Image (cartoon, grey):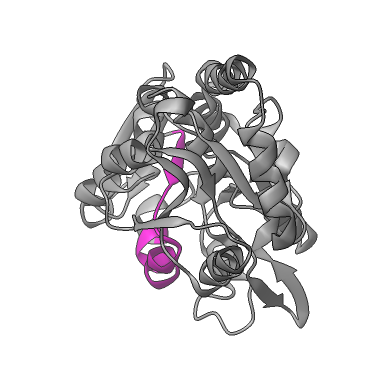
Amino acid sequence: MRALHLVDSLPYAESNCFQHQLMAALRQVGHQVDTVALDDFRSAEGYDRIVCCLKQRTLCRQVDRVAAAAKQVPVVVYDQDPWEAFRDGSPFKGTYQLAASRLNVLTFAVTTKWWADLVSSKGLPSTFVRMWVQQRYVDRGPAHADRPIEVGFVGSVHPYRRKLFDRLEQLGVRVTVQAGSSLPYPQYAEALSQLKVFIHCEDAPVIVDGKEANLKDGLWIKDVEAAARGCFSIRNAGSGLDTYCTGIETVLTYTTEDEVPELLRAIRNMDPLERQATIDRSVGYIQWVNGWHETALRLLTAG
């Protein structure tokens, strides 16, 4: 198998939080994989397939350019934000249909099971693949009892997350918030290691062909990341929990924000030795799974 791994640019692929982890996995799976930036993509001659990891908006705008170089070489399109190709009002709605009409698409590999099923329902080939945490970033870190922050969040404070934090403040729970969207990934991981409990909300309705969907049915990677750094992670319930978090005992969910104080009390009241053992088992499970390796293999063999 000889594959061409197509990216927006090498600096982007090497620095993006998930793309750099996937790129490393693609290079380690035992196949010949050449990473090529879009500006340098002239021909796919000699390759068995293209693993297209372009940003969705890049693929939408540059699909004819990609098609001219790809010709009939089979393409696997990897996408972490499939909703932008389907939600009403998105400037990129229809990107998958456009790509399928111009390229020899084997499958659209998307990182949320709910959205993979929706892609299939539209008559397009789809494959569910997981984002994960590269083994070098999996680290139990300081013991739970030694962490300085009781309840915290690191990342982008979207309005639906701010709503959660404000409600928890009313319930007597203070969340220490650190903006993390601009942090290099190693620093983001280190910031997680300072938290006893990571808490967030993924409750963002999107309308697809006039019907409501919700981002709560995905985005479980944030909980895997927190658990990989020795945190408990709490978030709102949604479908897909089992696709990412089976075997990770430190991921907990709530139906309403009012349930959160009790979840926190349950964590605090655990026997300290059993609590740490639970954390260690979860970290060990994430290390053992090696999910990026699984995803890289699927991208190279799907279709």
Residue range in magenta is: 48-67
Q: How far across and how far down the image is residue 18, in percent?
A: 40, 43
Image height of 77 relative to 5, above or below:
below
Q: How far across and how far down the image is residue 95, in percent?
A: 54, 69
Q: Which residue is drawn at 51% across and 50% down?
A: 77
Count of residue discs:
0
Q: Quadrant of residue 98?
A: bottom right
Question: Relative to 127, is 74 on the left or the right?
Answer: left
Closer to the camera, 20 or 262?
A: 262
Closer to the camera, 119 or 230?
A: 230
Q: How far across and how far down the image is residue 273, in percent?
A: 59, 14
Residue 53 counted in the magenta span? yes
Image height of 273 relative to 303, above or below:
above
Residue 189 counted in the magenta span? no
Q: Which residue is drawn at 41% across and 20% down?
A: 31
Q: Which residue is drawn at 70% across and 56% down?
A: 217
Residue 48 visible in rendering: yes
Quadrant that contains the C terminus: top right
Closer to the camera, 71 or 121?
A: 121
Q: Residue at x 67, y 59 (%)?
A: 216
Residue 44 visible in rendering: no
Q: How far across and how far down the image is residue 56, in percent?
A: 45, 63
The secondary structure that dominates the magenta segment is helix
Q: Quadrant of residue 134?
A: top left
